[in-house]
Amino acid sequence: MNLSNVITSGRIVDIMVVFVVLEVIVLIGYWHRTGRGVPTLPLLANVGAGGSLMLALGAVLKGFEPAIIALCLVSSLVFHVSDLAIRWKR
């Protein structure tokens, strides 16, 4: 399978998701061990927004139904608003 097929088939998104999950595991572990870095809830809100957009891209590339794509996009919006609410200085 060449790079073009990896991209157009949506497999690239699957690969990216694996790396993001590994990143989250490492960052959460680091935060819990050291107390430094990004706390778990803000990290998950931020990664959830981007991850949902990646899943929407994968759904488009794989030819999923529009309702699934819309669900991914709405999920991204919910994560994004949650991320803003967490970061908002009162």
Image (cartoon, rainbow, N blue to C red):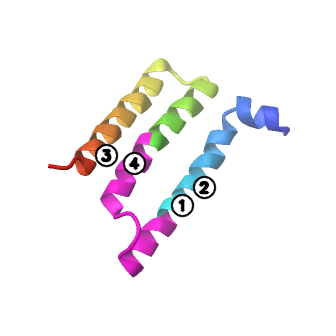
Query: Badge 4 is on which residue?
Result: 46
The verdict on residue 26 being magenta is: yes
Q: Is residue 1 left or right of residue 88?
A: right
Q: Which mark sits nearer the N-terminus, 3 or 4?
A: 4
As measured in the structure, the alpha-carbon distance from the residue carrying label 3 to the one carrying label 2 is 21 Å
Q: Earlier in the sequence, mark 4 or mark 1?
A: 1
Residues marked 3 and 4 touching at CB (< 8 Å): yes
SS label for mark 1: helix
Residue drawn at point x = 58 percent, y = 33 percent? 58
Asked if the residues shown at circle 1 and circle 3 are in contact, with their CB atoms under 8 angstroms apart, the answer is: no
Q: Nearer the viewer, mark 2 or mark 4?
A: 4
How far is disc 4 from disc 1 in space, using C-alphas? 13 Å
Please give the residue where the numbered disc 3 appears in the rendered image.
83
Mark sitting earlier along the chain (1/3): 1
Q: Residue furthest front?
A: 89
The mark closer to the camera, 3 or 2, is 3
- Under circle 4, the secondary element is helix
Residue at 27%, 50% in the rendered image: 87
Q: Amino acid at mark 1?
A: Glu
Q: Amino acid at mark 4?
A: Asn
